[in-house]
Amino acid sequence: MDLNFTEQERQFQHDVRQFLAEHLTPDIVEDTARNSSVFVEKDLALHWQAILVEKGWAVPQWPVAHGGTDWTPAQKYIFSRECYLAGAPMLIPLGLLMLAPVIMAFGSEEQKAEYLPKILSGEHYWCQGYSEPGAGSDLASLKLKAEADGDDYIVNGSKLWTTHAHLADHIFCLVRTSNSERPQQGISFLLVDMDSPGVTVEPILTMAGDHEVNQVFFDDVRVPQKNRIGEENKGWSYAKYLLEFERGGGFSAPRIQHELDRLRNMVEEAIKTVDNFDESGEIERRIARIDIDLKALEITELRILSAVSGGGNPGPESSILKLNTVRLEQAINELAVDVMGYRGLSMNPVAGGSPYREDFTASVVPRYLNNRAASIFGGSQEVQRNIIAKMVLGL
C-alpha cells in the first residue's frame, strides 16, 4: 500500500484543514475534550453534524445517491484524521454508521426513503436495542418477544445497557419472533418509535457518574410489521452485518492519536512541575509501545477501508480492530491516571468536573472508569477472539 499522498490528496487535506479552521470553533473543541462518555452530548454531536451536512461531508461512507461523497479511500482517511487531530467531536454512529448501512442493504425502498434522510438530518435520533438481562455477549439468547397481531407486532420484554435511550426518539431492536428453530433463526430486526405507548426508559448511572445507558421496557407495545427490516426470523444475519460496521466501520487510529497527543502534553507538564518525574523512563517506554501498536492499527484500518470502498463490508477482521482499539484506549486511560497520580483524587466523577482543572484533564478519571466497559460492549473481548480464531485464522 502506497502511504504517500498525491498532489490532489494534499490539496484535499489543505481544504479540510481550512474548513475545520473556519467551522470547528474553540467551544466545540473544548466541549469535546471534556467529554468522558462513549459518545459526546447529543446537542454537541447534532450541532457538528448539521455543519457537516451543510457542507455535504457528514457521511462519506454513504453512497452518493443517499447524500454521501464520492471520496477515495485516501480522502476518507484524510478527512477522518484531520477532524480527530483538530479535536472535532465524533458523530453519534448509532443511526449514521450502524442502522443506515442495514437499511441500505436490506430495507425496502419505502424504508430507505422514510428513514435515511431523517437519519442524515438528525430529525431521527436512534438508539440500539440489542443486549438484554441474560443476553449480552450471548445475544442469541434474547427474549424480547414480538408476536404478530394483524398488521402489527405486540412487543414485550426489555433491553439493557441501551446507550442514549433517554435521548432517542427511535430504537432499532432485535426481537424474538419464533421459538421453533435454532435461536439465531427466530430473531427479527424491528424499528420502534420510542413515543409508542408502553415504552418506558429507566436510567442507569455508570461508576463514572455519567447517564448514558438505560434499561428500556416494552409493555404490549404495538409496532407495525412494515417497520421490520427484511424477512421475518432473518434478523440475526442483519445484526451481524451491523456489528461489523460497529466494530470496524470507521477510523479509530486518528482519534486514539489525538488522545495520545493529549497524554504527551500531560507528561510534558508533569516533567515541568513534579520533581524526578519518570526517572526510570517507564512512562516513556509505555508511550512508545502504544505509539508502535497504534501505527499497526492504522495500517489495518486503511486495508479494511479499501475493502469497504470496493463495495464490501468490514468482515471478521473488524474484530481485530475492536480488540486493538479497546486495548490502546484503555492503555492510554490507565497511563493518564498514572500521570495524574494523587491529583486524580481531587476529581469526583459522580459530582462531575474537577476543582483541580477545567480543561480535558478533568475527564481523565471519569474517562478511565467509563472505558472499562469497552471490553464488553459491542461484543466482549473473548467473543472477538473467538471470531478471529474461527473466521480469520480458520481454527
Image (cartoon, rainbow, N blue to C red):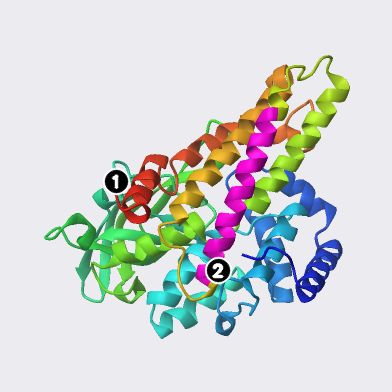
Query: In the image, what residue occupies the spot 84% across and 14% down?
Result: 275
Question: In the image, what residue type sits under mark 2?
Answer: Ser
Q: Position of residue 84 (x, y in %)?
A: 71, 54
* Occupied quadrant, residue 93: bottom right
User: Looking at numbered disc 1 in the image, what kind of residue is underneath it?
Assistant: Asp
Where residue 342 sits, quadrant-wise, is top right
Q: Is residue 250 above or below residue 369?
A: below
Residue picked out by circle 1: 138
Q: Which residue is mark 2?
A: 306
Q: Residues within 10 Å of mark 1 (few under 14, many from 20)?
A: few
Q: Which residues are magenta?
A: 285-308
Element assignment for label 2: helix
- Camera-side mark, 2 or 1: 2
Residue at figure coordinates x 55%, y 62% from the top left? 303
Res 319 label: none
Residue beneath the point at 62% across and 55% down: 42
Q: Are marks 2 and 1 in contact (CB under 8 Å)?
A: no
Magenta stretch prevailing secondary structure: helix
SS at circle 1? loop
* Residue 15, image x, y percentages: 82, 71
